[in-house]
Image: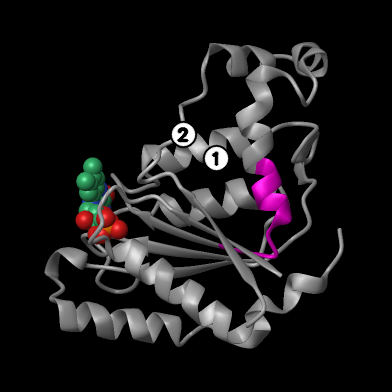
Amino acid sequence: MNILHIDCSPRSESHSRQLSAAVAHKLLEILPHAQIYRRDVGYKPIPHAGAAYATALSTPASLAAAGRSADALLLAEQLIQEVEYADVIVIGTPMNNFTVPSVLKAWIDQILRVSRTMKSSPAGKIGMLRDRPVFVCIASGGVFRGDRSNQPDFITPYLSAVLGCIGLKTVHYLPMQATAFLDESRAAALRSSLVATIQPEMVGLVHSSV
Ligand SMILES: Cc1cc2nc3c(=O)[nH]c(=O)nc-3n(C[C@H](O)[C@H](O)[C@H](O)COP(=O)(O)O)c2cc1C
């Protein structure tokens, strides 16, 4: 059993880091033999899609010619294999300007690829990866969900769309909202209440096949 734990905040005192760590800890209680492995794009950002990568993905012919082992696709292949190896994925991310930070977008740009993680069809994209639970821990300075929301939410529909189109359809959102107004004790209480929503059934997909 493998848990891929991704963090995206550049801050060590980050709310999304603390929440994703608490979620990973809770998952280890549910799956005591699980191994956790890390991809930290907050502390170690990956490069944005460069010319060689963009050229390889520009047409079906250039993609076929590149092949999986082309230098331009090596980073993408490594990141995709990390996702494939995982039975459960935990993502800690800030909300930046209503959506994902650019470091997470850079990761997404490496993960979604026609003929590798998704197929293109007239009806839309079809995921090629098996489904598995994804827990997304979002820290936002303000409120984007519920009665008190006062800003657009492009982050949850966007992540559901990008993860869903490669086959990861079981996405659970844990929003750590209004961090600008939380003292440590209220932050800890909110973190605990979010972690308490995680139930063993939510990782029940780990034995499903493609
Ligand atoms: C560049 C930038 C953009 C931000 N945009 C938003 C935003 O659109 N909505 C919001 O509620 N908070 C926004 N914030 C505040 C962060 O979401 C908030 O500080 C959050 O706690 C950061 O995550 P972290 O604690 O995990 O580092 C923004 C912060 C930065 C630095």
Q: Quadrant of residue 148?
A: bottom left
Name the residue that disc number 2 marks: 46
Query: Quadrant where the N terminus lies?
Result: bottom right
Tell me if 109 is positioned left or right of 42 in this view: right
Q: Amino acid at mark 1?
A: Ile
Q: Secondary structure at mark 1?
A: helix
Number of marks in the image? 2
- Specify start and end residues of the magenta stretch as a single range: 80-89
Q: Magenta stretch: dominant SS?
A: helix
Please check the rendered image and state whether residue 30 is part of the magenta-colored stretch, yes or no.
Answer: no
Query: Quadrant where the C terminus lies?
Result: bottom right
Does the closest atom of ligand 1 sit within 8 Å of the Cβ of label 1?
no
Q: Is residue 99 above or below residue 113?
A: below
Q: Amino acid at mark 2?
A: Ile
Tell me if 149 is positioned left or right of 62 in this view: left
Q: Is residue 61 above or below residue 8?
A: above
The x, y position of residue 134, in whole percent, is 59, 64
Name the residue that disc number 1 marks: 108
The x, y position of residue 107, in whole percent, is 52, 39
Tell me if 2 is positioned left or right of 105 in this view: right
Tell me if 67 is positioned left or right of 149 in this view: right
Q: Secondary structure at mark 2?
A: loop
